[in-house]
Amino acid sequence: MRESPSTQGEPSTSATVDDSCSADRVEDSQLFLSVPALNQAASYLAQTASFLTQCLPVPGYVGLSEEDQELVTLPPASAVDRLSVQTSSVVSTGTNSSLGQTDCSGSPSQENTGQMVPSHVFQNGASLFQGLVERARKTVRGSADDIGWLQRDQSLPTTEDGTARFLEILDSVRKNEHKLPDSVVYLLVPGLFSNHGPLYFVKTKAYFSKMGLACHIAKIHSESSVSKNAREIKEYIEEIYWGSRKRVLLLGHSKGGVDSAAALSLYWPQLKDKVAGLVLAQSPYGGSPVASDVLREGQLGDYVRLRKIMEILVSKVLKGDLQALEDLTYERRKEFLRQHPLPQEVPIVSFHTEASVTPSVLTALSHVAHLELPIAADGNFTRIPVVMPLSAAMAACSQLLVARYGEKSDGLVTRKDAEVPGSVVVRPERKLDHAWMVYSSLKEEPGDQADT
């Protein structure tokens, strides 16, 4: 029998459906082959993200609870335009039934459950990536935005350069033409870790005593917090004043200068008639990039757990308080100085230097202590000097601060952070590191150069 014209001119409906189903079967087979690999990669990404989140806590990163997790269908590369997103809350029995009716294979698409990956992988991944970028930026910047913040604060008083006058007086002292006044008592306040350096400030005190001047070294616990040491210094001042009836001139080195300034800020009403002035030598009055980079969250110390190491060293080994180091970070200094500014009527001198980085520092040894051993022929004790290469360590730290921030320092304190607003500032050109002021060197000073 001959087919009707209408039948010959139109394509068969059943043939069209068969061709469509065949094409879909090919695409589905490709989808099934490609999705397991993608699922495996997504699972690996989720595990990696979880691991990184544990190692590097990202601010603002919050995981999703299991009931809020969504499922995302991952398409193959050849079917990007057929991407579909299904949530666990949308899939129901009726939907599965409907899908089962329209599936070309005639069976429910149960394999889709194997193609689903939690959408929180992508959401958390974006949050994690953004947090990591911010953390990396914070790490790279370090203390760059904090160094010299006191000088940028327009509300603080300006400093006065007293370097020329200082050098004139120094030359007069060398010629015995200038004498320090004996109308005051000189109180030397040591810095961090001074309790473990028996010769800290000892040579300086001997100079004062040789000139017939009353001089004392404050026996404070240098590894204590600024507020605790400020209280002890206040008691020292009152004891000296009531015993001698002379005002006290404070000379603080490193953290000792910060502690001394804090004593005046916190207890000025009780001390204003008992204090003649304050000298800060190489003191991190504005803060220290070394302390901040070691302890502050998001800095280099986080990646090697340096904070934990310092906590064990200071608290367990040295029997101190980690807050002593924390009080020198920029955040703590900014907070303290805004709440407790220095009284403007106090005469203040700031002294800061730059460390030498010449090869000669490698051979310079600082005399920090001595041992007494009964090895002499007459039975008396013989002193053996205990030395440390402090100059080499300061030179290395100074180079690191120059390389990272482009800032000059004595090895621990930048020159900008050592200037107290409203003070007379002494900025000698001579290269002197942070330890030179308080520890004598076994190497003789040049004849034309002043000693400590």
Image: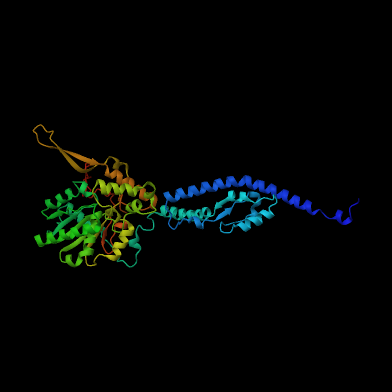
Rendered location of residue 286, percent (x, y): 31, 59
Q: Quadrant of residue 346?
A: bottom left
Q: Residue at x 25, y 61 (%)?
A: 424
Rendered location of residue 266, percent (x, y): 22, 64
Q: Residue at x 49, y 53 (%)?
A: 129
Decide which of 171, 223 is in the foreground and name it: 223
Rendered location of residue 167, percent (x, y): 23, 55
Decide which of 28, 212 is in the foreground and name it: 28
Q: Quadrant of residue 281?
A: bottom left
33 vs 401, left or right, is right
As drawn, which residue projects farthest toward the top? 377
Residue 107 visible to an observer of this rendering:
yes
Q: Residue at x 43, y 54 (%)?
A: 58
Q: How many marks?
A: 0
Q: Residue at x 25, y 64 (%)?
A: 342
Residue 279 visible to an observer of this rendering:
no
Question: In this picture, is 59 found above or below 368?
Answer: below
Rendered location of residue 216, percent (x, y): 14, 54
